[in-house]
Amino acid sequence: MVWHNDKSAEFSVQKRRRGVVISSQGWQRLQAAEYLSAVRDNGGHPYTLEQLSDRTGISSKTLTKVRRRQSTVDQPTLASYFEAFGLSLQNDDYIRQELDTNTRTAVATSLQQTPLKGQLAPNSPFYIYRPPAEKQFMGEIFQPGALIRIRAPRQFGKTSLITQGLSQATEYEFRTAVISLQLADREVFSSLSQFLQWLCMMVSRSLDLPHRLEELWNPLFGNNYSCNEYFETYLLPAAQTPLLLVLDEVNVLFNYPDIAADFFGMLRAWYEQARHSTGSSELWQRLRLVIAYSTEILLPLNLHQSPFNVGLLIELPAFTPEQVQELAIRYGLEPPAGYTTELVKLVGGKPYLTQLSLFHLSQSEKTLEQLLATATLPDSIFNSHLRQQLAYLEQDPELEEVMQLVVKSTQGIELHPSQSFKLQGMGLIRFQNQLAVCSCELYQKYFAQVLKD
């Protein structure tokens, strides 16, 4: 009898330890399907565990195992989860093995082979939702004549958020054009005419339309009028579907105030035309305009000619400790809570630096203690980023001097708005009791070393 119980216990343990864990491909497929379902059937709100349990017939505890990808589940359970969102489980969607310590490392490695850079794919398992940004953005692009402003420091996920919206817009057969002003060289900004014609050509190209500048551009009527006509008589009527136009890094224009004043006034006019009961208002309602920028507006724009005081403003914050912990889970690190406090203190929840840190930790290249101890050394994983930030500062000696004062102060300092806007746009400072302080420990240590008298 004792022998039977021992064998049963051994068999039970073996049975529990068999199973599958969702693969990178499977996780991305499932997240994409779950996300689209939430948009269509749940008002854009991510499903709670209770809602998922009701929909799939799987317990919340088991769902947590599936989603954390650190414990195995049986294959039929995983298949049921997929089927609940209209997917069939494929062989490449799971890994069949016991999830011991070595396997956890293998799973984390299979999820991401290189550090993440730039925008994340719409179905990336490493995209972290920052409510209410996604819900606001997804809802607003369906509003006729919408104007959405997305503001956040560099490398804070503006483009990744936009990619989420573009994916959704494509599902509903929107026409889309994404124009980054960083792609424009100095010649483009030599005059308003040159810039607006470049813009029209870039949008035409994005929509796979031949440009018709020779035919539709008339300098006698002025550049803004010609650009307006190009959109009104050609680009907008080219199809009945809405046009989602994304202008990324528009803060580049802040360096060209003469061009910026006229251009931003025209954007405001487009927004207003969609709201007036005129013959062309229905046409302008097809335009959904997204403006992304990394700093406050430094231009003295007329209140009634600025696009920066109308529409919807979305400001992307740094990751919260809870979001950093969730990301640690997705990288296969455990216990995830053990990485949160020190990492948030070091990089301040900055999305790019957090992703970079967790990637290298997941590859077992460094322990957390080693990462903290070597953060500002020349061979640090942060070195390239820090040198780039230093190069930005060195382009503006006055700004470099101000940053030197910030790192020297223990309580924070008062800054002129133009200085604070620029440093905030770089993500270098935050405000504490209306005083500027370094935004994270990494910057404090590094700039204290390199910005010496």
Image (cartoon, helix red, strand yellow):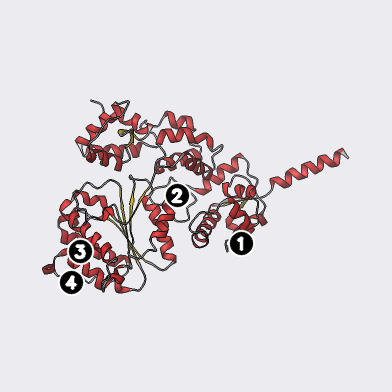
Residue kind at label 2, given as amino acid type: Pro
- Kindly identify which residue carries mark 4: 214
- Distance from label 1 to label 4 (Cα)? 54 Å
- Kindly identify which residue carries mark 2: 131
- Give percent across and percent down for residue 364: 51, 37
- Give percent across and percent down for residue 224: 18, 63
Which callout, 1 or 4, points at the residue further toward the start of the chain? 1
- Distance from label 3 to label 1 (Cα)? 50 Å
Which callout, 2 or 3, points at the residue further toward the start of the chain? 2
* Mark closer to the observer (1, 2): 2
Q: Which residue lies at the image location 22% right of the left edge and 41% below the top edge?
A: 418
Q: Left or right of 216: which side holds 50?
A: right
Q: Secondary structure at mark 3?
A: helix
Q: Secondary structure at mark 4?
A: helix
Q: Which residue lies at the image location 67% right of the left edge and 57% below the top edge?
A: 76
Residue kind at label 3, given as amino acid type: Gln
- Distance from label 2 to label 3 (Cα)? 37 Å
Q: Are marks 4 and 2 in contact (CB under 8 Å)?
A: no
Residue kind at label 1, given as amino acid type: Glu
Q: Residue furthest right?
A: 1
Quadrant of residue 246 in the image?
A: bottom left
**Vertical position of residue 217 compared to residue 400: above or below:** below
Residue kind at label 4, given as amino acid type: Glu
Q: Are marks 2 and 3 in contact (CB under 8 Å)?
A: no
- Distance from label 4 to label 3 (Cα)? 10 Å
